[in-house]
Amino acid sequence: MTGPAPECAALAEGLRAVRARTGLSLTALAGRTAYSRSSWQRYLNGRLPVPRQAVEALCVMAGEPPGRLLALWELADAEWSGRARSAQAATSYDPAPHTPVARPAPPVSAAREPAQPSTAHPRRSRRRLLIAAAGTAAVAAALTAALSARTPGSGRTVLQSPPLDPAPGCHGTACAGKDPVLMACGLPGRADAWGLPHRTGTGAGVEIRYSQVCAAAWGRIWHSHVGDSVEISTPGTPSRRVVVTGEADTKAYRFTPMLGDPARSEVRLCFVPTHGAARECFRP
């Protein structure tokens, strides 16, 4: 039985390294994401194709910039889907009958270098260029049409953003009390800090996060101690709290449940240390 392709093995190794930085067990990963314990086990050993969303969720929990792992995921996904093998087959067949020969693909710079014009068939070369230009124009027109919609009654056409993948699981008040990771509100590019992060008297870091696509806010804590907690609140709604319950939690970001559609000026984040020190509260 052969092992995973090198691209898949490299992704699995990267996932294991990021998971180690979270300090979370497989059971804890399953509890904080949309993927089961057995799925995570297979993702981490390279036996099962990993959803892009799982990679992003793991990076969020570890506070890890997702760029490197997503680049590895793109390479591994090409292997899982067969796109890499199809591309290799298209460039490695010898024209001699029944003689397939393995040939390396040309360098990117060479592949993108424009071909020299042919003097033998100038009309044919020009026709190929016109066809290619027409194809490019058709693709551009199709993309514009897909991203455009006519405003009813106005006669105007406005550009629309492409749908998010994965789609956010809630919006506004519907997010109240829900997990920002499970709802795909805290994925890279979907959330920003409201104000500067704060270093507490015990050394823990706390911060208010806000997602525009979900219209929701939450708190997060890191470099904490077992028993520490952080609570986010706004007048007239239940406060949301998370407690650091184990050593694994002290090495990773922990998030409160969300406040739905809060007014920024009214949001307050409070840190409650475990050793009896004073409560510390912050605003954006």
Image (cartoon, grey):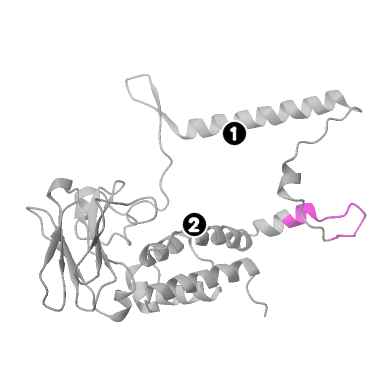
Q: Secondary structure at mark 2?
A: helix
Instruction: Please say whether residue 222 is visible from this viewpoint.
Output: yes
Numbered circle sitting on residue 38: none
Left or right, residue 39 beside residue 180? right
Q: Name the residue furthest left.
A: 236
252 horizontally vs 102: left or right: left
Q: Is residue 102 above or below residue 161?
A: below
Indicate the position of residue 245 as horizontal and vertical percent values: 24, 78
Q: Which mark is residue 67?
A: 2
Q: Nearer the viewer, residue 155 or 180?
A: 180
Is 75 magenta? The answer is no
Report the residue marked by disc 1: 139
User: Residue at the location (60% across, 63% down)?
Assistant: 80
| Image coordinates for residue 163, horizontal then vertical, percent | 41, 44
Is 95 colored magenta in this rendering? yes
In this view of the protein, which residue sits in the foreground, 267 or 120?
267
- The Cα atoms of the two marked residues, 2 and 1, are separated by 28 Å
Please report the bounds of the magenta region as a residue range.
88-101
